[in-house]
Image (cartoon, coloured by chain):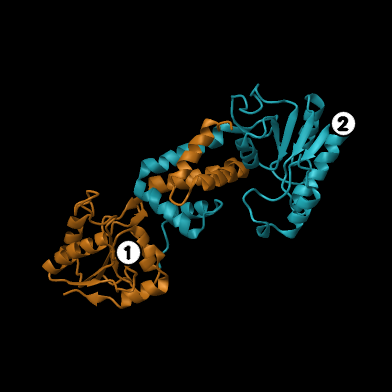
Chain colours: A cyan, B orange
Amino acid sequence: MHSFPEPIEKTLKELSRLPGVGKKSAMRILYHLLKSGGSAIEDLEGALKLLRENIEKCRTCRGYKEKGSDCPICGDPKRDPGLLCVVESTQDLHLIDGTSAFNGSYFVLHGLLSPFKGIGPEALGLDEFRERLENEAVSEVIIATPYTAEGEATSSYLITITEEKGIKASRIGMGIPIGSDLSFVDPETLSRALSGRREVK
Amino acid sequence: MHSFPEPIEKTLKELSRLPGVGKKSAMRILYHLLKSGGSAIEDLEGALKLLRENIEKCRTCRGYKEKGSDCPICGDPKRDPGLLCVVESTQDLHLIDGTSAFNGSYFVLHGLLSPFKGIGPEALGLDEFRERLENEAVSEVIIATPYTAEGEATSSYLITITEEKGIKASRIGMGIPIGSDLSFVDPETLSRALSGRREVK
């Protein structure tokens, strides 16, 4: 088998680095691009350049926003400034915002506390989080980190900070997903769903 | 749900155009890029630019090669110039070349005859194919188009041209499932289909 010309090898390497793109998918994408011709490749390049040059983190919520523009979330006057939801990632932010069950502001950690990976409170911007609690009229912090070891550790830490400031902290509900069979839920979730049961009125 | 900043929307749109990348995967890739930071995006941009600017079709086999360099296949003196394998796509070329059951030269059609899609002999470079048969010492043309309606129609057409020049035409072995794409076949089947090719009379 002959090797590929260098520009093809390089593109395959870069494409394979993307999440969910294996060797075969990279090959499919590559041939699609080559077949579509220069303008299709240029469009993708242009979008990436725009992304690289014009997207920055909002200083308040740490979500992504366009440079020179207000953050679409923090700059939205219709949101409740008293509710602050803390999420692991911008992806989680959009998932939660897509439910329309929440209309407050956000704080994006861009990770979870992890001593093994060397991720401490500074990397998650927890000083900025503390400052927001001091400077804004936050009445409740909703912690929406996942129910994993790291998510739970991060949550404990956030609860401590929040309560130190005399603010109410709450944790996103845990239990059985809607439409799911009990048999698909692990015993730990089931046991917590039971102990966290709510009275029906 | 708030809308995304334009550079993010544009990137999502371009990523969703890639084969095998749906809305959810595009989102995953986007956040991966944003999280990896500017240099990761720049690396991908650079690879795409290199691909766009430095890859061209070889005039002989019509496969992709680096500009200013010899074609890695047509320029390889160890290959048998008497055997010419005709494939639908460069992807198929690499699949076949990866089996090491074939060590001749190639001709890439970049499509199949299709009256419905308006793809005629010119679009597939069949004049160039004819010229190769006239100018090179080809002793056998192995037709490796898929066993689909379009692949078979293309094969008939190629057989006619080949036999007109008094050259032996053979069809890749019927080890390939009918209606299937070459990329779904494992290398072993592909290699057997090659060695089990039959002459078309």
Looking at the picture, how far across and down is residue A17, in whole percent?
A: 55, 53
Q: What is the number of the mark on residue A166?
A: 2
Marks 2 and 1 in Cβ contact (< 8 Å): no
Would you identify the image quadrant in which residue B38 lies?
top right
- The reply, left or right, for residue B138 in relation to residue B188 is left
Q: Quadrant of the N terminus of chain B?
A: top right
Counting from the top left corner in percent of width and height, residue B49 is at: 44, 44
Rendered position, A146 above or below A169: below
Q: Residues within 10 Å of mark 2 (few under 14, many from 20)?
A: few
In x, y percent, where is residue B171?
Answer: 25, 71
Q: Nearer the viewer, residue B162 or B46?
A: B162
User: In this orientation, does residue A9 appear?
Assistant: no
Kind of residue at badge 2 = Gly
The residue tagged 1 is: B179
Can you say which quadrant of the picture contains the C terminus of chain B?
A: bottom left
The answer to whether one can see residue B19 in this image is yes
The image quadrant that residue A188 belongs to is: bottom right
- Check the residue under mark 2 and report the chain it is in: A
Query: What subunit carries mark 1?
Result: B
Where is residue B147 drawn, in percent x and y?
28, 66
The residue at 47%/54% (across/down) is: A12
Query: Is B18 above or below relative to B153?
Result: above
Q: Secondary structure at mark 2?
A: loop
Residue in front for this viewpoint, A187 or A88: A187
